[in-house]
Amino acid sequence: MAKKAVASLQTGSKRLTKAIKMVKSPKSGAYTFVESIMDPKQVKEFFSKK
């Protein structure tokens, strides 16, 4: 189960996207959030990675 959240950010002339993914820890079974700011073209790749 993964939660997807995407927000668009603009800094100067560059357009960036902040993506937040919920990942289940294999050790404890608890969920953690992984955040990353990236180019909008890389968002699909970020969510497809485990």
Image (spheres, helix red, strand yellow):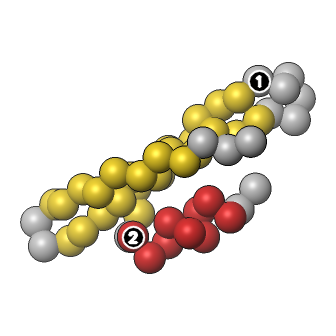
When the figure is inspected, residue 50 is found, relative to residue 24, above or below; the finding is: below
Indicate which disc, 1 or 2, sits on the residue closer to the N terminus: 1
Total count of labels: 2
**Residue 46 numbered tag:** none
Q: Quadrant of residue 10?
A: bottom left
- Tag 1: amino acid: Ala
Q: Position of residue 43 (x, y in %)?
A: 50, 66
> For the point 65% across and 31% down, which residue is it?
32
> For the point 20% across and 71% down, which residue is it?
14
Badge 2 element: helix
Outermost residue toward the left in this view? 12
Residue position for label 1: 30
Residue position for label 2: 40
Q: Position of residue 31 (x, y in %)?
A: 71, 29
The crowd level at tag 1 (other Cα within 10 Å; few <14, some 14-19, many 20+) is few
When the figure is inspected, residue 30 is found, relative to residue 33, above or below; the finding is: above
Q: In the figure, is residue 31 to the left or right of 6?
A: right
When the figure is inspected, residue 10 is found, relative to residue 30, above or below; the finding is: below
Q: Which quarter of the image is occupied by the N terminus?
A: top right
Q: Position of residue 19 (x, y in %)?
A: 46, 52
Outermost residue toward the bottom in this view? 41
The crowd level at tag 2 (other Cα within 10 Å; few <14, some 14-19, many 20+) is some
Q: Position of residue 12 (x, y in %)?
A: 10, 66
Q: In the figure, is residue 29 to the left or right of 23?
A: right
> For the point 84% across and 26% down, which residue is it?
29
| Residues tagged 1 and 2 counted as in contact (Cβ below 8 A) | no
- Tag 2: amino acid: Pro
Badge 1 element: loop
> For the point 56% across and 69% down, which residue is it?
44
